[in-house]
Amino acid sequence: MMNETLRMITERYSCRAYDGRLPEKEQLEQIAVAAVQSPSAINRQPWLVNVITDKALIDEMDAEGMRILAQADDKAVYERFMERGGRLFYNAPCMFLILKQPGTELDCGIVSENIALAATALGLGNVICGMAGIPLGGENAGIFMQKAGFPEGYEFGMSVLVGYAAGSGSPHEPDLSKIRWIG
Ligand SMILES: Cc1cc2nc3c(=O)[nH]c(=O)nc-3n(C[C@H](O)[C@H](O)[C@H](O)COP(=O)(O)O)c2cc1C
């Protein structure tokens, strides 16, 4: 039988359709604790984890992001999202927004994966979502940063969307040719 943790790693996949139902508070709390359990350089923990469960705010950020993408010179990204249903955040009811101190991308990335694996372990759909940086980086960034609870000194790190999957998905095939044994 496969070890539970290793099984979660093999089962995680990027979920791009949610039914909109908010998971139990207790589940979101467990995921949040897994997030701040992450390792960090010199144990600095240079992050904040804002758990956004205000669906209206998530939808507002979604619409702002799509508006910005629609105005871009290169429409390829906008068109890809239109093909996927026209939603930047796939109707997810919860966004784990990771705020970081400047220059701590790696620490922040580890938090993202802890969140993704914890959500998978609880049977919840999840996707690491860099696109949250679009509404938080456009001309209305200040408004959205204020609504999303950014304190002074923190910037957008990453987001992870979490909720109940609408439909099923599957993990990507691991490319074993990337593994090289030296020695
Ligand atoms: C840093 C980072 C940012 C990502 N941003 C997005 C995103 O904005 N939207 C999205 O749908 N997927 C996003 N993904 C998910 C990747 O597309 C996905 O992990 C990859 O295609 C592999 O598929 P899998 O996660 O299902 O194994 C992101 C992943 C990472 C690591």
Image (spheres, helix red, strand yellow):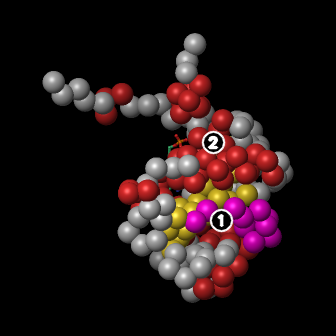
Residue 73 forms part of the magenta stretch: no
Q: Is mark 1 within 8 Å of ligand 1?
A: no
- Residue located beneath label 1 in the image: 50
* Few, some or many residues within 10 Å of mark 1 (<14, 14–19, 20+): some
Depth order, front residue of 50/116: 50
Task: Residue type at mark 1: give it.
Answer: Asn
Quadrant where the image shows the N terminus = top right
Q: Amino acid under label 2?
A: Ala
> Residue at horizontal 69%, vertical 62%?
51
> Residue 42, percent across and down?
38, 57
SS for dot 1: strand
Residue at image x 25%, y 29%? 180
Residue found at the very far left of the displayed protein = 183
Q: Which mark is residue 97?
A: none
Q: CA distance from mark 1 to mark 2?
A: 16 Å
Query: Residues in magenta?
Result: 48-59
Q: Eyeballing the image, is 167 above or below 92?
A: above
Q: Residue furthest top?
A: 1
Mark 1 or 2, nearer chain start = 1
Decide if residue 161 is in sight here: yes
Q: Is residue 58 magenta?
A: yes
Q: Residue at x 46, y 71 (%)?
A: 101
- List x then y, in percent, for residue 76: 50, 64
> Whole-percent x and y of residue 34?
61, 47
Front residue (pair 182, 21): 182
- Viewer-closest of 24 and 130: 24
How many marks overall?
A: 2
Kindly identify which residue carries mark 2. Answer: 118
Q: Secondary structure at mark 2?
A: helix
Q: Within the image, what quadrant is residue 171 found in?
A: top right
The x and y percentages for residue 56 are 80, 70
